[in-house]
Amino acid sequence: MTSPENRRVGLGSTHRLKIGLFGANCSSGRAVTKLPERWTGSWAECKRLAQMADAAGIEFMLPIGRWKGYGGETDYQGATLETITWATGLVASTQNLVAFGTVHAPLIHPIVAAKAMVTADQIGEGRFGLNLVCGWNEDEFTMFGVQQRDHEARYDYAKEWLDAVKAMWSRDGQFDIAGNYIKLKDVRAKPKPYGGTRPYVMNAGASPTGQAFAIANCDGLFVSTSLQALDTAEQTVRRVRAAAQQQGRELDVFTAGVVTCRPTRKEAEEYDHYATVENADLGAIDHILAMRGVTPDKYSAEEFATLRRKQAYGMGGVRLVGTPDEIARDIAALSQAGIAGIALSFVHYIEELPYFCAEVLPRLARLGLRNPA
């Protein structure tokens, strides 16, 4: 799990399948639900969750870069913790956990970002990671007073931004950066990342341009899949890893999953329906869909209902609903397709994670995907 320029192997883990937690820095997490017990995303909850995950051997926590909520009855993801600061607090509060910062390249100056990330990395002694995003949420760009670039130019800018940050992480002395977008004069950057390496960098570009960017510049790529499309996922993994190897690089492929795990399948399905159908925040869901050009006039009633349901269930991601045996089986199928790691979310992380760790992790160990406790 490394590339020639980055020796931080395996996110500090020897488990065959890496497991992380996704979206805990946001109110409601990734479940667009009105349930009163929904996740608050408070610092106290995040810190407690990180320490629980660290004790269980979970490798990483990955935040969502969110600056403005989606409205609806709950103002979904309206209260969020800035991610580099959040990650700094988490690595200071844990022993082995890797905490990522999710950074919008178009919105954060590279000098500020590079310095903030090095600070987190020094505090965590090499346990900070960067999830670099180009942004899509027009509401947020408007709030910042920033004009979104067209799709291709977004990734051209992201490459210059990341190259500038990597230069500040590695180059000594004073230097200039003269790109098409980023022009910096007499740059000096001290200290450097911890231990003479650099943070692990991941990206979730889905388009051919986005994937090409990750292949050439990142250590990890997030892809969307489902249990019904594992053949396609396997083909994607082989293709992007082969493309990276042709450039002399290694690339890990991750995916996201949303877990509802209960002792019986009936209990899991009933809670899943209760949270994401009976109590879905439809106002927020419809706003998110409209931002992506998905409106009722463009789809049949049945198609639009399906899209609403998918959005309610964790903002996308693999649906993992069932018993511990079923959840472990489904995660194993993802690993068999070549997925190196999975970032999981729950309706309420702290209430649900202990059962997952007690029941699912040992099953994954018996399947050879995790080391025995």
Image (cartoon, rainbow, N blue to C red):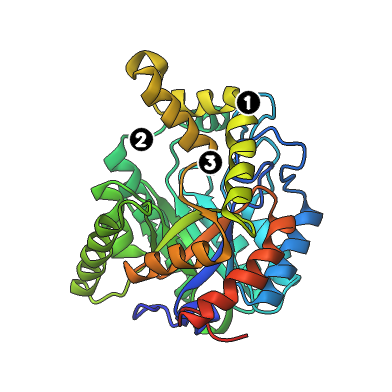
Q: Residues within 10 Å of mark 1 (few under 14, many from 20)?
A: some
Q: Earlier in the sequence, mark 2 or mark 1?
A: 1
Question: Which label sits on residue 149?
Answer: 2
Q: Earlier in the sequence, mark 3 or mark 1?
A: 1
Residue mark closest to the camera, 2 vs 1: 1
Q: Residues within 10 Å of mark 3 (few under 14, many from 20)?
A: many
Residue most extreme to the left: 246
**Between 192 and 318, the one nearer to me in the picture:** 318
Question: Which residue was labeled with disc 1?
Answer: 71
Residue depicted at 37% across the width and 25% down the height: 303
- Residue 112 in sight here: no
Look at the numbered discs 2 and 1 and tell me whether their residues touch, using CB distance below 8 Å.
no
Q: Earlier in the sequence, mark 3 or mark 2?
A: 2
Q: Is residue 348 left or right of residue 224?
A: right
Residue depicted at 35% across the width and 77% down the height: 3
Query: Where, quadrant-wise, is the C terminus in this rendering?
Result: bottom right
Q: Amino acid type of disc 3?
A: Tyr
